[in-house]
Image (cartoon, grey):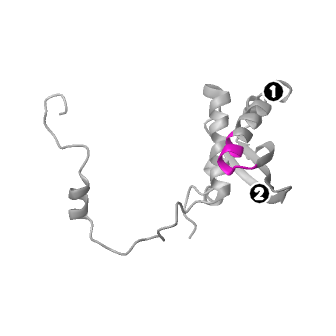
């Protein structure tokens, strides 16, 4: 229909949206930038480094869990110690993520640490591990734990 010029528009204007959505109180304080945690952003930056360094080799069923996040000041500078686990479903996928003699996971760790330091404006010590969590995508409790399903 788009080739023939028929069908509706894909977007609406702010004015049109305001006419459709009823007015209401703000959902968040004016100072609130996000409802996500620092751990969430850290896991997303590690995931981005995985995509960047592994490309098409990256198993699509990877999950990144930040298991430890400790902040402190030392000599007037912020320091963050972080542990994260990359979860995959099979041993063969674990080998892909780790790489020969740990070369791939080392590259991922360096890239992730650089992103994290830029984001948090602090020195970051990142400990990355890779573990197999067999068929986690088929396990409802795991999907809830990892945030893919709402907990009841």
- Depicted 104 relative to depicted 86: above or below: above
Task: Estimate the x, y position of residue 129 in percent, counting from the top left.
Answer: 80, 43
The residue sitting at 66% across, 46% down in the picture is: 63
Residue 116 within the magenta-colored segment of the rendering: yes
The C terminus lies in which quarter of the figure? bottom right
Residue 69 marker:
2
Q: Secondary structure at mark 2?
A: strand
> Disc 1 or 2, which lies upstream in sequence?
2
Q: Which span is picked out in magenta?
A: 115-122
Please, which residue is most extreme toward the top here?
100
Residue 17: give x, y in percent of width and height.
Answer: 25, 58
Q: Residue at x 33, y 74 (%)?
A: 24
Q: Which residue is mark 1?
A: 103
Q: Residue furthest bottom?
A: 25
Q: Residue at x 72, y 33 (%)?
A: 93
Question: Quadrant where the N terminus lies?
Answer: top left
């Amino acid at each position: 229909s788009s080739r023939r010029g028929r069908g509706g528009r894909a977007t609406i204007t702010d004015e049109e949206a305001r006419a459709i959505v009823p007015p209401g109180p703000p959902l968040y304080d004016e100072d609130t930038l996000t409802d996500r945690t620092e751990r969430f952003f850290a896991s997303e930056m590690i995931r981005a480094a995985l995509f960047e360094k592994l490309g098409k080799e990256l198993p699509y069923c990877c999950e990144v869990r930040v298991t430890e996040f400790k902040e402190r000041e030392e000599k007037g500078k912020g320091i963050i110690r972080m542990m994260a686990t990359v979860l995959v479903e099979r041993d063969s996928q674990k080998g892909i993520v780790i790489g020969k003699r740990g070369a791939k996971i080392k590259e991922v760790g360096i890239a992730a640490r650089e992103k994290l330091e830029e984001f948090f404006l602090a020195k970051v010590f990142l400990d990355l591990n890779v573990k197999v969590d067999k068929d986690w995508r088929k396990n409802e409790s795991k999907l809830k734990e990892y945030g893919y399903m709402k907990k009841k």
